[in-house]
Amino acid sequence: MLASILAKQGVSTLLLEGASHPRFTIGESLIPETGLRLRIVAEKYGVPEIGWIGTFHKLRNHVSSNCGVKRSFGFMYHRAGEENRPDEINQFGTLAPPVGPDSHLFRQDTDAFLAALSVKYGATFHSQTRVSEIKFGDDEVELRAESGQTYRAKLLIDASGMRSMVSDQLGLRDEVPRFRTDTRALYTHMVGLRSADLLLDSRGRSRLISPLGQSTMHHVFDGGWMWVIPFGNHRDATNPLTSVGLMLDRRKHPEPQGTPEQEFRRIISAYPTVARHFAEAEAVRPWVRSGRIQYSSPHLIAPRLIQLPHAAAFVDPLYSSGMSVLIVAIDLIAEALLKAVADDDYSIERFQFVEDVVNRGFDHYDAIVSGAFDSFASYDTWNAWNRNWVMGSLLGTFGPLSLWVRYHKTKDRSYLLKTTEPSRMGVLGSHLPGVVDVVRASRADMEAAVDGEITHAEASERIFARFRQVDFLPPYMGFGDPGKTATATFTLIPGARHVMWYRSHGDATYRENCTFPLLAYARDGAGFVLDETRQAWRRGFSALRDVFFADNGDWRHTAPALDAHPHLVTPIPPTTPFADEPTEFDPAGSSQSVA
């Protein structure tokens, strides 16, 4: 994404890939905050395809039908030896059209698409190019590949992830990760995994706000949690795979037991509902098992170097916020780097705030995730603690949503520029003091329960009581009500209700962040419906035509998904010259060579 943005703005950009695409990787679940920021960044920097990744319908239409739809987060709590209790299922809805819903990214497709996109915008892309040596000079960075090829650049952006060569070379990583979260992972892709909705009877399904099979599904238990991310969960799906991963608290599961699959099967066998869910599931690729998955760095910035978040730190996949941290950083880096290129000044000071924002986001995220692992000891504490994340996700989503709708109404680009203001630049509400204070107080309650100073039931009641006193959350959403296990939906009518409440009851900060023109939002919704209807009619007409006629004029038209690239798609004139007529370019008679 960053290579595409820089190349689009005319920056000479080289993208080096050690492996090749397509390839397997995890990190497949988007959240509303991420999707909105992807769309804003796409508009802000003139790369509309990045926005396609951020919303399911455009992703399905323009990139890949191998990706899944995500209408909610779903959480089923489990006790050893017992079936799940239907009243112990929590849900949090994602955004509805015109902005949502969110997606499950089949990364083999989306990553290959984005790599090709960078070339489309002018970046130089070399795959299967493993770097063996890096030298940082005063004015440039020199990289030598295993093939012997040497590359020089004014700045290196490290996007290499957990096994960052740069981190090792410069000693950037903490020897012991600073995060409280301490987990290890088992994961793969599976087939034969049926929808989680089939685990419930009709009464249990009636309590849901949307199907569990169209959510990022979580099985939660004392000592860990599991993700279930289906790709084949919509009517246009072409992918039978489901991403499955098990995250284990190393305090309770310190050492691996048997092969990764044996350990997975042994653990789920203790939970009858989970065992039923996976009775017919089969892995289609080798299981991966990790040691401790957390790593951290105090610094992402060094002379002639910027690290993207996943090269510097990682917490845990719970709540799917890793890509939110990433897209925040991409926006910050792109804005600062374009100015640095113009001034030919790459001093550390120009990028220091990127490090500050990213580390603040990771620390806030770690507080929420580590508190969740502590809360898994009982449903009461998990039900209470989960509200901290819901609060951050709600308010973290409203900030970019308000900017997006206002921009759409006015086309005033000043709304796009606000995304890098300190009061807007945070993940899960980490930029909002009220949110941070509530999370810290709740974290203290959980620590007291873990230390045995209070019971888990007392910790739960303290957290619920605190939420009943919070004045920047709508009371009707039930944050302080243990029986309200689905606190928010974001279809048109409930979404309008949220906006109206913040208009009437929010202070200046929350009124600015959580309100937007409702008529503009409704108009965009109507436009979405009309656009989908037009596409359906067009496809239906084409199908009818093809039954009777082989000839057609489709070759004269530029596909809507390619309209952003007139330099790559030459419009077809109304009449086309015959083969014997002269053209501007005659390969046989030209002596011009192109390298």
Image (spheres, rainbow, N blue to C red):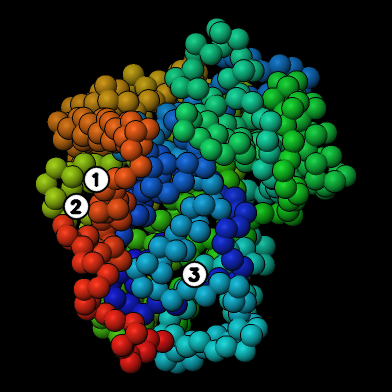
Task: Decide if residue 532 is on the left or right side of residue 154.
Answer: left
Quadrant in which the C terminus appears: bottom left
Q: Is residue 407 left or right of residue 539?
A: left
Instruction: Compute the Cα span from label 2 to label 3.
Output: 27 Å
Locate the N terminus by quadrant. Answer: bottom left
Q: Nearer the viewer, residue 22 or 29?
A: 22
Q: Amino acid at mark 1?
A: Trp
N-terminal label among 2 and 3: 3
Q: Quadrant of residue 516?
A: top left
Task: From the top left corner, tell me how far across and down residue 575 is, in percent.
Answer: 17, 60
Q: Are marks 2 and 1 in contact (CB under 8 Å)?
A: yes
x, y percent for residue 207: 49, 13
Residue 496's quadrant in the figure?
A: top left
Q: Would you name the residue on which mark 1 appears? A: 404
Q: Is residue 97 left or right of residue 322?
A: left
Q: Secondary structure at mark 2?
A: helix
Q: CA distance from mark 3 to mark 1?
A: 28 Å
Give coordinates of residue 245: x percent, y percent: 67, 41
Q: Tell me the residue at 40%/44% (across/down).
A: 59
Mark 3 surroundings within 10 Å by alpha-carbon count, few (fewer than 14), some (14 through 19), many (20 or more): many
Query: Could you say which is closer to the camera, residue 481 or residue 256?
Result: 256
Amino acid identity at mark 2: Tyr
Point out the tag, 3 or 1, that comes first from the N-terminus.
3
* Tag count: 3
Tell me if residue 267 can be seen: yes
The tag on residue 307 is 3
Q: Classify 10 Å Cα crowding around label 1: few (below 14), some (14-19), many (20 and above).
A: many
Q: Which mark is residue 415?
A: 2
Q: Amino acid type of disc 3?
A: Gln
- Mark 3 element type: strand
2 or 1: tag closer to the N-terminus: 1
